Image: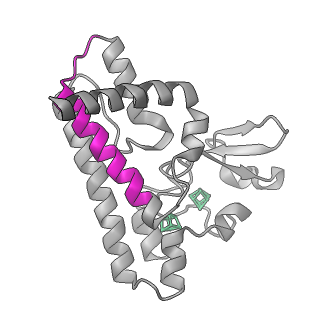
Amino acid sequence: MGDLCVKCTMCCNGTLYPKMPIKPSEREALGPAAEIHVNSQGGLELALGCRCLSDAGACQIYERPPSVCRSYSCSLLESVKKGEFTAEEALAIVDELHGMFDKLQKFCQSVMPEVEWPYLLVGRGVLMELLAKAEAGGAVLSRYDLATINTQQRFIVQYIRQHLDVKFMQPFVEHDAMLGERAVKAMNEAAEQFAKA
Ligand code: SF4
Ligand code: SF4
C-alpha cells in the first residue's frame, strides 16, 4: 500500500465493496476475526471492512494478502500510475471524499442525535438502513433534512464513480436490494416534494 492507499483505504474498509472473493489457502492468514462466508457457488468471500486493516490505514498482513488485494487497483490509482494525476492530486481527491463522508455523518447526527451514525454512510447501504430504522422508531425527518441527505449522498456516489470506480454502489444495490430500493424511493420522493415546495 502506498501513501495514497494508506490515506484512502476505501477498497478495504467496506466503502467500495461489501465483500471480496478469497481462496481457501488464504483463509488462515486473514486470522480468526475475519468474517468469511461461503457463496451460492461454494466459493469463499471475505466480508469488508477487512479486520486486517489497521486504524492507521495499513494492511496488517501486507506480506501475504489475498491475491485479489495484490492485483486490485482502483481507477484513481491507475490514473496515478499512468501519470494522468499526480500523487498530490490523487490525495486531494481522497481528502475531498473523506470530507464529504464527514459532512454527511455530521449532518445526520445533527438531525437524528438519537441514532449512532457511523462514518461510512454509503457503503453497505448503511445510510439507508439507519434511515429506515430511525423512521420505524418514530424519528421524523423534515423534507429539507431528507433532501439534504439525499443530495450529499448522491454527490458522494457520483464523486466515487468519477474517480475510483465507475460501477460504485452496484454491488451494494444488489446486496441490499429491497431495503435500498425502499429507502432510495422515499428519499427521492421527499427530494421531489421539496423541489416543488
Ligand atoms: S480505493 Fe484505490 S486509492 Fe483507495 S485504497 Fe483502494 S486502490 Fe488505493
Ligand atoms: S487483507 Fe489487507 S489489503 Fe486485503 S482487504 Fe484486508 S487490509 Fe486490505
Q: Residue at x 53, y 86 (%)?
A: 82
User: What colour scheme was applied to this rendering of the protein?
Assistant: one colour
Indicate whether residue 144 is drawn in magenta: yes
Left or right: 16 as drawn, with respect to 108: right
Q: How many numbered dots are placed on residues in this image?
A: 0
User: 19 or 181, which lies in front?
Assistant: 181
In x, y percent, where is residue 41? 84, 39
User: Which corner quadrant of the image does residue 189 belong to?
Assistant: top left
Residue at image point 27% right, 32% down: 192
**Magenta segment boundaries in residue numbering:** 138-160
Q: Residue at x 73, y 64 (%)?
A: 67
Q: Residue sitting at 55 percent across and 31 percent down? A: 176
Question: Compared with residue 197, is residue 73 higher up or lower down, i.e. above or below?
Answer: below
Q: In x, y percent, where is residue 7?
A: 39, 67
**Which residue appears farthest toward the bottom when viewing the image?**
83
Q: Residue most toward the right?
A: 42
- SS majority, magenta: helix
The x and y percentages for residue 6 are 44, 68
**Where 190 falls versus 122 (above or below)?**
above
Horizontally, is 189 left or right of 103 in the view?
right
Q: Where, quadrant-wise, is the C terminus in this rendering?
A: top left
Q: Is residue 25 magenta?
A: no
Along the viewing direction, whichever of 170 and 32 lies nearer the viewer: 170
Q: Nearer the viewer, residue 30 or 36?
A: 36
Q: Position of residue 23 (x, y in %)?
A: 80, 53
Q: Residue furthest front?
A: 196
